[in-house]
Image (tube, helix red, strand yellow):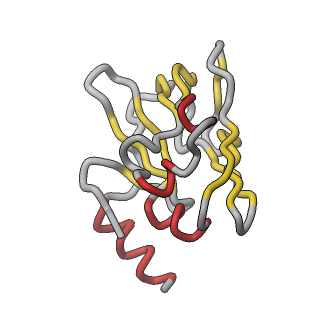
Amino acid sequence: MEFPDDVHYTAEHEWLRLEDDGLVVVGITDYAQDQLGDIVFVQLPDVADTVISKDEQLAEIESVKTVSEVYAPISGKVVKVNTDLADGPEVLNEDPYGYGWLVHMEPSGDDPTAGLMSADEYRALVSEGD
């Protein structure tokens, strides 16, 4: 199971990475994709002026086991979605921290990482669930 140090984690198994341009990239964790099983469909928000509040539904992921909602780890404007997931949702299983990203967001708050977990903290959370 991967726990990259360059991302921040939520208890709901999403990750967030700060980019040099001030945007953040959001995805689901390796643990989340493993729990979902084979992912077969991903529904993402529209880009045009879509502002999402923290904890508001951001995406929906359908796997062979279940349908799961993904909630925004921060408030902000969705500026880019991973359109490649429409034709290849299995990328979420194969590369959740790389090509399997979900959206890029422009944060509306000062510190988008406030209240999120480090890799060590998230690893401890996941190990508690085992």
Task: Measuring from the top left, give residue 88's x and y in whole percent.
Answer: 56, 42
From this view, report whether residue 63 is shown above or below residue 73: below
At x 65% / y 13%, what residue is drawn? 48
Q: Residue at x 75, y 58 (%)?
A: 67
Check the image and report above or below for 82 versus 115. above
| Residue at position x 46%, y 44% in the image | 100
- Left or right, residue 81 beside residue 58: left
112 w.r.t. 15: above or below: above
Q: How many marks?
A: 0
* Residue 10 on image: x %, y %: 48, 56
Is 5 situated above or below 22?
below
Question: Is 42 in front, or is 124?
Answer: 42
Which residue lies most toward the top here?
Answer: 48
* Left or right: 112, with 76 as reference point: left
Between residue 63 and residue 56, name the one nearer to us. Answer: 63
Which quadrant holds the N terminus? bottom left
Q: Nearer the viewer, residue 38 or 46?
A: 38
Q: Residue at x 54, y 51 (%)?
A: 90
Does 88 sit left or right of 64 as displayed?
Answer: left
Q: Residue furthest right?
A: 67
* Image quarter of residue 62: bottom right
Percent from the top left, x then y, of residue 65?
Answer: 71, 69
